[in-house]
Amino acid sequence: MKVGLPMQAPNLTAPLTTPAAGATNGHSNGDSPPGDITAAAVAQLSAQHGESAWLRAARLAAFATYESLPLPNWNRGIGNWWTTDISAVKPDSLHLYHAAGGENTITDAFSTQEEHAGLIVTRNAGAVSSHLRADLAAKGVIFTDLVTAVREHGDLVQKYLSHSIPVGTDKFTALNAALWNGGVFLYVPRGVAVDLPLHSLVALDGTGGITLHHTLIVAEAGSEVRLVEEFRSAGGDGLSPVRRGDAGAPAVYSGVLEVVLGTDSKVEYFTIENWGPEVYTFNQRRADVGQNARMHWVFGVLGGRINHSHVDTELLGRGAETQTRGIYFPHGDQLFDLTTLTHHVGDHCTGDILFKGALRDASRAGFAGMIRVEPTGQQTNSYLSDHILFLSDQAKADSVPGLEILADDVRCSHGATIGMIDEDQVFYLMSRALPRVEAEKLIVGGFFEQVLQEMPLESMRELVRDQIQRKVELPQLPLPTPVF
Amino acid sequence: MTMQTLAETHTHTEPQADELVVTNLHVAVEGKEILKGLNLTIRKGEVHAIMGPNGSGKSTLVNALMGHPRYAVTAGTAMFKGENVLDLTPDARAHLGLFLAFQYPSAIPGVTVANFLRTALVSLHRERRKISDAELLSGDAPSGAETAAAAAQSNRPPKAPAIKEFRKTLRESLALLKMDENFATRYVNDGFSGGEKKRLEILQMAVLKPQIAMLDEPDSGLDIDAVRIVAEGVSAVRGPNVGILIITHYQRILNYIKPDVVHILVGGRIVQSGGWELALKLEKEGYQWLKAEFGLSDEEMADEGGAAHASA
C-alpha cells in the first residue's frame, strides 16, 4: 500500500484536556491541580491507577531523583562548541498531559493504514485504542498499554520496568519513571514469531505539556517481533516550517524504551519521528541483547524542533548482533542530536551502525557514536559510520564517532564524512534538463538510498523516500542570523 | 509523416533556428582568462571537431556553453533559436536542445541509470509540452505508439515516455552501445570503468536526442575497440537534425566519424579551420608548427594542464 503522511496537521478532533479543565477530569485533589509536577501528583497518579506498593514506591523514589538532578547539559566540544539548548523547556512550568479519552479518530497515519498484527494508539497520555490479533493473544503475546499491563501482568512488568535504563540517567528519565502515564508493553513468549509488525502511534495535541511514555519490549528465547513506533503532533509534521522566533510554548515528549532480548530472539524496532515543530523530544533507548539474539534498530528522524535521542545497545551474550540504520533530515532551524553506544560485553558479537543525515537551511545535527569493547568482548566485529550532506552553508553538524577497545582480538572501524552537495553533480543533472530542485531531489534521494535499501519494510521505505523528496522541495524560509 | 513533422522540417532551412553561433566568447576560470574571443558556428546536420593542445580551452568552451557555474563568461554571445544560451540556466539550455557528453561525468550514488534517464526525459517533456500546445490542439498529440526509431528520425522533442516505451528506447540504446541490460539498474557512473562512463554519456545522447551535442573527449582513455563502439554510437545519432561538436586530441575517433569541419584551438582562440586534411596534418605533425605559423607565444603553446585541466 502506498502511504504518504499528510501535509496538514493530524486530524485530532477530540478536545484537548488542559490543566484548567483538569478538575473536570474527576481527580482534582486539593492544593495540587492534577497535571502539576509534584510528589503529590505522583502519589495521586499511582492511586488513580490503583497501583501496587512496589510501583508507587518506585515512582516516589524516582521523583526524589528527579528533584535532585539538574537539567541535563548536552553541550560538548571545546568551549561547548556543540550546544543542545533546551532552556525553552522548563519542567516546573510544564503540566502533564491527561489522557485524551474517547475513541481513536486518527486514520491517516502510517500505523493505522499499514497492515499490522496489532495497534496501540496513544493520545497525549494514555491509550485510546489497543488491539492485538486474537491468534497472537492466544499464543501468549501481550501487547497492551503499560497502565493495563501493570494491572494485568504486574509481576512481568515489575521484573523488567526501569531495569535496563537507570532512573538516574538524567532528569527527564527520572521524571519519566516517576510520572509516566502512557506507554506500551510488548511481551513475546518463548519461540513465538509475530509475523506482521505491531504498531504504536503516539500523537500529541496542544502545547505547554509533557508526555512521559515508557515502552517495554520483552522477547523471550527464540521469539521474533517487529514494533513500529510512529510519533506525530497537532502542530504539523516533519515538513512544517520551523523557525527560531516562531516558537510558542513547547510540547515535550519524553520517551524511555527498554528492550530485553532472550537467547536466539530477534527484535526489530522502527521509529517514524514526524513531530510537528512545537515538539521537543528526549529519548533514552536501550536494548539488552542475549546470546545469539539480534536487535535491529531503524530510526527515521524528520520532525520536531529539538530531538535529543540516545540509543544504547548492550551486546551481553556470546554471538549477539545489532544493526542500526538511521536517517535524519532537519530543516529550518530544527536540531537533531543523536548519540549511540554499541557496548560489547559478550564475545563473538557483531555491531553495525550506519546513519545518514542531510541538513537544509540553518538546521543542526549532532551525531556522537561510540563503540565500547570490554575485555570480555573478544572476537568482536563492530562498525560505525555517519555521513552528512549539507544542502545549505548555514547548516551546522557535529559528527563524533569513537572507539574504546579494551579487548585485544577485535575488528572495529568507524568513520564519518561531511560535505556540501556537490555542484558538479548538480551541474551534471541540470545539463540533462533537470531543474535545480529536481537535481537535488535525485542526489539527496540517492544519498539516502543505501540506508533505505536496508530498511526491512517496503512501505516504510516508500514513506521515508516520499518525505525526503518533499523535504528537499520545501521553499526556503528567510531565517534570522544564526546565533551560533 | 505528419503535418507537424513537415512543418518542422521546413524550419530547418531557416538559419536562425538551425545554428549555434558563438561570437567573441571570453571565459575565465578562477580569474584566469582561458577563452579569448572565440568564434564558431555549428549547423544542424554538421559534425565539427575541435583539436588542440592541453590547456588550449577546449573543455572550457563546452562547459561554458553548457553553463557550468565555475566557468565565468566575461564577454560574448552564443545564439541558438534566437536566444543567447549564455543567459540561461543549464537545464534551460538542455530544454533548448543543447547536450554535453562530459569528459569526467559525476557519479550519482543511489540513483540508477534507468531512473536518471527517465527523470531527464520527463523533465525535457514537461517543459517542452508548454510550447507545443499547438501540437496538442492540432490533434497531433504524442501517441505512445510512435516507435523509438521513428522518434529518432523526427525532430520533435522526446515525449514523456510510458514505462513500456521508455524501456524499449533504453534497450535499443543499450544494444547500440553494446551494453548489458543490467547496466540500467546500476547507479549512475558509480564504480564505472572509464569506458563505461563514456558509453553512458553517448547512451544519454541517444536517448535524449539533443539538437546540438557537444562531446568532450569521448575517446580519452579508451582502447581501440571501445573507441569504435563509442564512435558507432555517435554515428547512429548523427543526422540532419543534430549538430555535433567533438573535442579530441586524436584523429583516431575521427576515422570513424568523419567531421565536416576541423578546428584548431590554441591559446583560447580558433586559429585555423579546415576539412578532414587538417586532422591528418595534426596527427602527423603535432601542434608545434602552429607556433611559427600563427606567431603564438610559448605561454599559449604551453601545456596549461594546471588550472584548466583540473577544472575540465
Image (cartoon, rainbow, N blue to C red):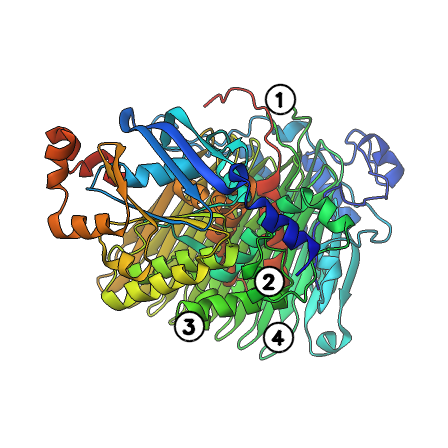
Vertical placement of B221 versus A302: above or below?
A: below
Point 67% across, 42% down: residue: B131
Answer whether labels 2 and 4 touch (C-beta < 8 Å).
Answer: no
Quadrant position of the C terminus of chain B in the picture:
top left
User: Marks 2 and 4, how far apart in space?
Assistant: 11 Å
- Asked which secondary structure carries label 2, the reply is strand
Vertical placement of A402 versus A318: above or below?
A: above
Q: Tag 3: residue type?
A: Asp
Neighbor class of circle 2 (other Cα within 10 Å; few <14, some 14-19, many 20+) is many
Point 61% across, 78% down: residue: A192
Vertical placement of A349 versus A233: above or below?
A: below
- Asked which secondary structure carries label 4, the reply is loop
Q: Where is residue A289 in the image (x, y as percent from the top left)?
A: 46, 65
Residue at mark 1: chain = A
* Tag in front: 1 or 3: 3
Numbered badge on residue A309: none
Answer whether labels 1 and 3 touch (C-beta < 8 Å).
Answer: no
User: Marks 4 and 1, how far apart in space?
Assistant: 50 Å
Point 68% across, 31% down: residue: A94
Answer with mark 4 or mark 1, whichever residue precedes in sequence. Answer: 4
Which residue corresponds to mark 2? A217
Asked if labels 2 and 4 share a chain, the reply is: yes
Neighbor class of circle 1 (other Cα within 10 Å; few <14, some 14-19, many 20+) is few
Numbered badge on residue A245: 1
A464 or B212, which lies in front? B212
Which residue corresponds to mark 3? B180
The picture quadrant where one finds residue A3 is bottom right
Q: Position of residue A74 (x, y in %)?
A: 46, 34
Neighbor class of circle 4 (other Cα within 10 Å; few <14, some 14-19, many 20+) is some
Residue at mark 3: chain = B
Q: Tag 2: residue type?
A: Ile
Which residue corresponds to mark 4? A189
